[in-house]
Amino acid sequence: MTASDMLSNRLDDLAETFELLGDWEERYRYVIDLGRGLAPLTDAERSEANRVRGCASQVWLVTETSEEGALVFRGDSDAHIVRGLIALLLQLVSGLRPEEIAGFDAVAALGRLGLSANLSSQRSNGLAAMAERMRRDARAHAKAS
């Protein structure tokens, strides 16, 4: 399966789930529940180096490389909905190779779920900042290898 197919399948699964949920109140609860499932970061990982700039809430992303060369992201936030947005991004891109992530527009992909129309401008900007941080980390890892 190609990375494009994998991304498409992941996005299809999310879109199907969102469609089944119906209204945005249910969808917000689902996103918040996804965030609750994230493993917490350690105090050391909640460092300035891991902080995502451009988010109204406190957001931290940790980028690690698997033995196969894929990037694995972990993240956390002090805001429930933002933790959920992190979880959505992780579902899409975590485990892909750096060059696959670097060329993927996660915000546009998540637009298919109707997120942009239903998030405040601050949350939308934060989502874009998180996605750009993942792409930047992916570009840096791709150059290093």
Image (cartoon, rainbow, N blue to C red):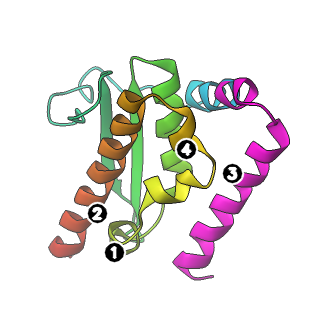
Span colored in magenta: 1-28
Total tally of numbered discs in the picture: 4
Q: Is residue 33 left or right of residue 133?
A: right
Q: What residue is disc 2 on?
A: 138
Query: Relative to 41, is 114 above or below?
Result: below
Residue ID at (81%, 36%) = 21
Cα distance between the residues tagged 3 and 2 = 23 Å
Residue ID at (33%, 21%) = 57
What's under tag 4, amino acid-wise?
Leu
Cα distance between the residues tagged 3 and 4 = 8 Å
Q: Would you say the residues marked 3 and 4 are in contact, meaning their CB atoms lie under 8 Å apart?
A: yes
Cα distance between the residues tagged 2 and 1 = 7 Å
Q: What residue is disc 3 on?
A: 14
Secondary structure type for disc 1: helix
Closer to the camera in the image, 61 or 109: 109
Q: Say the numbered circle drawn on residue 99.
A: 1
Q: Residues within 10 Å of mark 1 (few under 14, many from 20)?
A: some
State which quarter of the image contains the C terminus.
bottom left
Q: Say the numbered circle drawn on residue 88.
A: 4
Q: Is residue 41 magenta?
A: no
What's under tag 2, amino acid-wise?
Ala
Q: Residues within 10 Å of mark 2 (few under 14, many from 20)?
A: many
Secondary structure type for disc 2: helix
Q: Earlier in the sequence, mark 4 or mark 1?
A: 4
